[in-house]
Amino acid sequence: MKVLGISGSMRPEGNTSILVKRVVDYIEAEGCDEFNTEYISLAGKKISPCIGCDKCRETKWCVLDDDWDDIAEKLMECDILILGSPTYYYDVNGQTKNFIDRTYSLFHDRKLAGKYAVVISVCADRGGERTLSTLEGFVNTHEFGYIGYVAGKGAAAGDVRKDESAMAKSIEVAENILKMVSRTHRDGKRKQ
Ligand SMILES: Cc1cc2nc3c(=O)[nH]c(=O)nc-3n(C[C@H](O)[C@H](O)[C@H](O)COP(=O)(O)O)c2cc1C
C-alpha cells in the first residue's frame, strides 16, 4: 500500500508541507509494515504548464520534458495520494495547477482511476474553499476515491502549527486511511 504525499507549495518547509507531512508521517509511524510512504515537495521542481498540444491523446504520456515525469511515475505507483496546495488568489497556486493540468495525459486511459485521495489547502484568511474545490475537481475527474480533506490557516511558514483544528484533522484523515486499509487490505496489525 503506497502512500504518496505531494505539497504543491514553492515553500519547501511551508504550511502546506507541514500538513501533508503530518498525514504521511502519522501513517508511516502508525501503519503496519505493509505501508510504504513517500513525500515530495514541488518546490524547486520544473513543471511547465500544459500547452494543450493534445499529443497525449496518442502517447498517453506528457510529451514535455521536465521534472513532471518523475513525479507522475510516483503518482502512477501510489495507492493513496495526499495532495496539498497553498491558496493563491482564492485558488491553488501555479505550481500545483501546472502539476494537475499535466495529468491530462493520464486521463485518457483513466490511469489514476481507483486510487484514493486526500486533499489539503492552506490559506492565510480566505479562499481556501475554492482551493479545496479545485483539488476535488482533479480527484473527481480522475475517478479517485475521495477520503477527505484538511483546511488549514496560516500566513508565515509554520503558522499552521497554531491551527489546532487543522492539526487535529490531519491526524483524523490519517486514521481514516489506516482504518480503511485495515478493512480492505490489512488484518489489524500495527507496527510494534
Ligand atoms: C501570491 C500569493 C497569493 C495569496 N493569496 C491568498 C489568498 O487569496 N487568500 C489567503 O487567505 N491567503 C493568500 N495567500 C497566503 C498563503 O495562502 C499563505 O501564506 C499560505 O500559508 C501559504 O502556504 P505555504 O506556506 O504552504 O506556501 C497568498 C500568498 C501569496 C504568496
Image (spheres, rainbow, N blue to C red):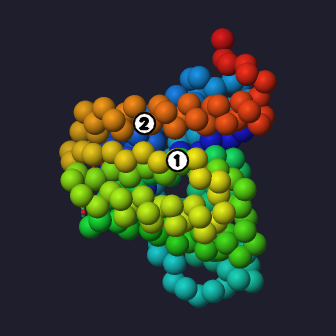
In front here: 52 or 152?
A: 152
Do residues under tags 1 and 2 come within 8 Å of each other at their CB atoms? no
Indicate the quadrant containing the N terminus: top left, top right, bottom left or bottom right.
top right
Q: Which residue is drawn at 67% across and 19% down?
A: 190
The tag on residue 148 is 1
Q: Which amino acid does label 1 sit on?
A: Gly
Q: Where is residue 142 in the image (x, y as percent from the top left)?
A: 64, 66
Q: In which quarter of the image is ligand 1?
A: bottom left
Residue type, label 2 = Lys
Specify whether 16 is left or right of 21: left
Taking the spot 21% from the left edge, 48% from the top edge, the residue there is 155
The label shown at residue 169 is: 2
Closer to the chain start, of discs 1 and 2, is: 1
Residue at the spot 52% in from the left edge and 28% down from the top edge: 26
Q: Is mark 2 on a helix, strand or loop?
A: helix
- Residue 31 vertical placement versus 99 (above, below): above
Q: Which residue is drawn at 67% across and 69% down?
A: 106
